[in-house]
């Protein structure tokens, strides 16, 4: 969630109010679409640098889902874990 807090701070929002259910994408989102893109890139870079995990979060599978895997921190976390597991196979 530190990457999301950083993105919200950069967008001028209140990062201290972030929870697992904070809306990232959709009505009431805490960041705009450019912020979402920056967030995804930041998470990918942090995974690579801190955990030596190379993953693409905004892939075809993610973009074709009925519900966005980026809608809340809890859903995004599940998506990250799924992509990391898929990459390990």
Image (spheres, rainbow, N blue to C red):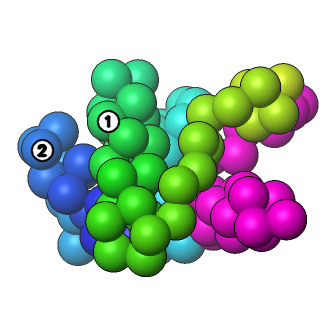
Which residues, given as a range, are shown in magenta?
A: 65-89
Task: Answer left or right for 1 relative to 73.
Answer: left
Task: Answer left or right for 59 relative to 53.
Answer: right
Query: Can you identify the residue that label 1 sits on?
Result: 38
Query: Can you identify the residue that label 2 sits on?
Result: 10
Q: Is residue 84 magenta?
A: yes
Q: Give how far across and how far down residue 78 sits, in percent.
A: 72, 66
Q: Is residue 29 magenta?
A: no
The residue at 61%/34% (across/down) is: 58
Q: Give how far across and how far down residue 52 sits, in percent.
A: 44, 70
Quadrant in the rendering for residue 18: bottom left
The residue at 81%/59% (across/down) is: 86
Which of the image's four quarters has the C terminus? bottom right
- Label at residue 62: none
Dots 2, 1 in contact, CB < 8 A: yes
Mark earlier in primary sequence (2, 1): 2
């Amino acid at each position: 969630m530190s990457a999301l807090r950083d993105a919200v701070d950069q967008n001028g929002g209140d990062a201290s109010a972030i929870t697992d259910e904070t809306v990232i994408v959709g009505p009431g989102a805490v960041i705009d679409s450019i912020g979402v893109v920056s967030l995804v890139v930041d998470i990918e870079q942090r995974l690579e640098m801190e955990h030596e995990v190379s993953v693409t979060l905004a892939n075809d599978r993610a973009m074709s889902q009925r519900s966005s895997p980026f809608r809340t921190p809890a859903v995004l976390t599940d998506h990250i874990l799924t992509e990391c597991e898929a990459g390990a196979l």
